[in-house]
Image (cartoon, grey):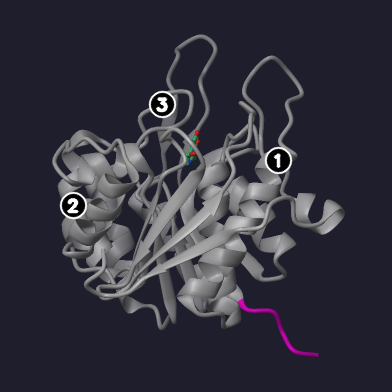
């Protein structure tokens, strides 16, 4: 038997199951990679105290990492919510020691329900310590904007420029996700030379909780399975678009994407690709 590729997510827990670690592990399972997790925080609002972010200690983070490495070993890592400078420092040191092929960094900052998932003062540490280690970073528009000192990003042209400028932070590839702009959902991939645009139609739904987490988890899964960056993004975009197409909610609260959708119903929307060669952007 060929053993499945081993992928770890280092991220927060979202108890409702739509985002964070839960979305990542569901995605890993759907894409047939062996998933492991290191929890950095538990994001769940206490009904009486209103406290929403319950951080794990550095010791607990180090223990989880060491256990997963010892019991299993790891080939690819996906990073989600890190919250504090202290956690960023810990995680960057752990990842630096690991012998991995791929590191996908999703620079998670604010959740769909407006929960703060990264302290303002930790943005600098994320830029200086974590992003330069990344094979790929996957910011959405608000995250790209914050990483670029508050720059406004309102068009595909500005999305492309953001990808070029974010590349200068030292990562190998940048995927800026334009899902929050108007019109079709267009993402821009930049590798320091060429640019690719990935486009799908806008889907009319509010149930997109965890879409960003699932997208970057799917990219990490495909990369670790051996696909190229381009092919991994294309397949992951298809996976998450189909999951969004079949999103649902059990309550009147914004609901999850449906991770099993592509397997059960097939691809919902073809991903259109536009290749912009160096110098044409
Ligand atoms: O979708 C961003 C996100 C990431 N990680 C955790 C979250 C959320 C959104 O709520 O809770 C743990």
Q: Name the image quarter holding residue 25.
A: bottom right
- Span highlighted in magenta in the image: 1-5
**Crowding at label 2, few (<14), some or many (≥20) Cα neighbours within 10 Å?**
some
The answer, for residue 119, to whether it is visible in the render is yes
Indicate if the residue with disc 3 has its beta carbon within 8 Å of ligand 1: yes
Q: Is residue 5 left or right of residue 134?
A: right
| Residue 122 pos. (x, y %) | 21, 43
Is label 1 in a helix, a strand or a loop? helix
Q: Quadrant of residue 68?
A: bottom right
Residue toward you, 63 or 8? 8
Label 3, on which residue? 115
Q: Is label 1 or label 3 in front?
A: 1
Which residue is farthest right?
264
Q: Quadrant of the N terminus?
A: bottom right
Q: CA distance from mark 2 to mark 1?
A: 36 Å
Residue 72 visible within the image = no
User: Nearer the N terminus, badge 3 or badge 2?
Assistant: 3
Q: Residue 125, labelled with which disc?
A: 2
- The furthest residue to the top: 48
Q: Main secondary structure of the magenta part?
A: loop
Sequence-wise, the earlier of marks 1 and 3 is: 3
Question: Which residue is identified by label 1?
Answer: 245
In the rendered view, does 160 fall on the left or right side of 201? left
x 51%, y 64%: residue? 273
């Amino acid at each position: 038997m060929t053993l499945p590729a081993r992928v770890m997510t280092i991220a927060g827990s979202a108890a409702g199951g739509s985002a964070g670690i839960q979305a990542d592990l569901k995605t890993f399972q759907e894409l047939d990679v062996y998933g492991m997790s290191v929890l950095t925080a538990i994001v769940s609002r206490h009904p009486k105290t209103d406290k929403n972010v319950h951080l794990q200690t550095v010791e607990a983070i180090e223990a989880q990492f060491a256990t997963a490495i010892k019991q299993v070993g790891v080939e690819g890592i996906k990073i989600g919510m890190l919250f504090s400078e202290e956690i960023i420092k810990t995680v960057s040191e752990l990842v630096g020691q690991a012998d991995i092929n791929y590191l996908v960094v999703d620079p998670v900052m604010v959740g769909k329900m407006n929960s703060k998932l990264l302290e303002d003062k930790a943005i600098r540490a994320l830029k200086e310590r974590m992003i330069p280690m990344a094979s790929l970073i996957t910011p959405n528009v608000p995250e790209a904007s914050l990483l670029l000192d508050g720059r406004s990003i309102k068009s595909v042209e500005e999305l492309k420029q953001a990808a070029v400028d974010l590349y200068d932070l030292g990562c190998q590839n940048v995927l800026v996700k334009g899902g929050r702009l108007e019109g079709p959902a267009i993402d821009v991939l930049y590798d320091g030379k060429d640019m690719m645009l990935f486009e799908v139609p806008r889907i009319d739904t509010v149930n997109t909780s965890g879409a960003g987490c699932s997208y970057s988890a799917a990219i990490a899964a495909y990369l670790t399975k051996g696909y190229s960056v381009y092919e991994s993004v294309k397949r992951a975009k298809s996976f998450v678009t189909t999951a969004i197409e079949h999103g649902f909610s059990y309550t009147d609260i914004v609901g999850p994407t449906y991770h099993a959708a592509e397997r059960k119903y097939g691809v919902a929307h073809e991903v259109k690709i536009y290749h912009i060669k160096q110098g044409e952007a």
